[in-house]
Image (spheres, rainbow, N blue to C red):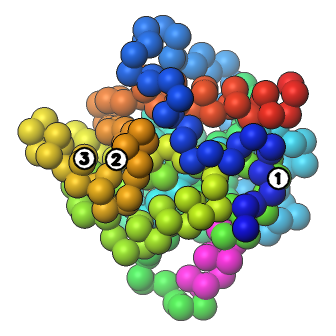
Amino acid sequence: MSRNCSAGMTQRSGISAADPGQRPERAMTMIIKKAGLETVAYRDQDMPLDGLPEIAFLGRSNVGKSSLINCLLGRKKLAFTSSTPGKTRALYFYRVNDAFYFVDLPGYGYARVSKEEQRAWAALIEGYLEHREPLCGAVHIVDCRHRPTADDRLMAGWLRYHRLTTITVASKSDKLSRGALARRLPEIKKELELGAAEQLLPFSARTGEGKERLWGALKDLLKQADMAKGR
Ligand SMILES: Nc1nc2c(ncn2[C@@H]2O[C@H](COP(=O)(O)OP(=O)(O)OP(=O)(O)O)[C@@H](O)[C@H]2O)c(=O)[nH]1
Ligand SMILES: [Mg+2]
């Protein structure tokens, strides 16, 4: 059942071992010396061959995946963003510091494409998540304003089933008041069936809220991948 991921990377816990919220901020930021689009993949053959660890960013169409990647990398327009949902139709590999890749996946749940195209995307995404050897973890993004959709719940269950280390993020946190956000986060956790030790990180690409904590979690994840590979 478990996907062919690096040995030792089978816990769905990316952020539970050490709480990034407890660490000094300086230790958590990542200095981006170099970031660029390496390749756009429509099929397996288009994907990088260098074996650098990969982190997948996934979520419903228009949830803010590409904006989050730009925010993390401190680049305004590296990943393509749009107010029209369903624009990302392939896997976009962004190479960071020549050390790892961020992979921007097509959003799921976009109804206004044909069933055939939806099936083709689903096959591409599932094939990648299930079989891609350098993949060491995922960032699953849900919109903090809404109840998780059936697709969100399916995706969370799928990631759990396949034991892919996952960091869950509640995007567009600037759109809610502090009080509303505090009430909503436990509800989302419950609906996605996240364990008590698993965090749901609020994030805003607009204000940068949550950027340091997310980098802290990503650094932990990359460290585990390096250790598993003996790098
Ligand atoms: N207020 C606010 N708007 C955001 C935030 N993140 C993204 N958006 C907006 O949401 C829309 C979609 O953002 P994208 O980053 O393109 O979303 P995506 O998930 O990559 O979309 P697809 O690739 O089409 O699946 C854009 O209009 C963004 O400006 C955020 O943190 N706050
Ligand atoms: Mg996108």
Q: Residue at x 56, y 67 (%)?
A: 158
**Residue at the outermost bottom position:** 115
Helix, strand or loop at mark 2: strand
In primary-sequence order, the first of circles 3 and 1 is: 1
Q: Is residue 202 left or right of residue 153?
A: left
The x, y position of residue 22, in whole percent, is 39, 16
Q: Residue at x 40, y 52 (%)?
A: 194
Relative to residue 58, is residue 14 depicted above or below?
above
Relative to residue 116, is residue 133 depicted above or below?
above
Specify the quadrant of the image occupied by residue 1: bottom right
In primary-sequence order, the first of circles 2 and 1 is: 1
The x, y position of residue 19, in whole percent, is 44, 24
Q: Which residues are magenta?
A: 117-125
Which residue, given by chain and number where applicable, does mark 1 sit on?
133
The x, y position of residue 95, in whole percent, is 72, 37
Mark in the foreground, 2 or 3:
3
Q: Are marks 2 and 3 in contact (CB under 8 Å)?
A: yes
Q: Is residue 122 left or right of residue 151?
A: right
Which residue, given by chain and number where applicable, does mark 2 sit on?
170
Specify the quadrant of the image occupied by residue 173: top left
Magenta: main secondary structure: helix
Q: Which mark is residue 185?
A: 3
Give the amino acid type for the residue marked by disc 3 in the picture: Leu
Q: Which mark is residue 40?
A: none
Relative to residue 119, is residue 9 depicted above or below?
above
Q: Residue at x 50, y 66 (%)?
A: 157
Give the amino acid type for the residue marked by disc 2 in the picture: Ala
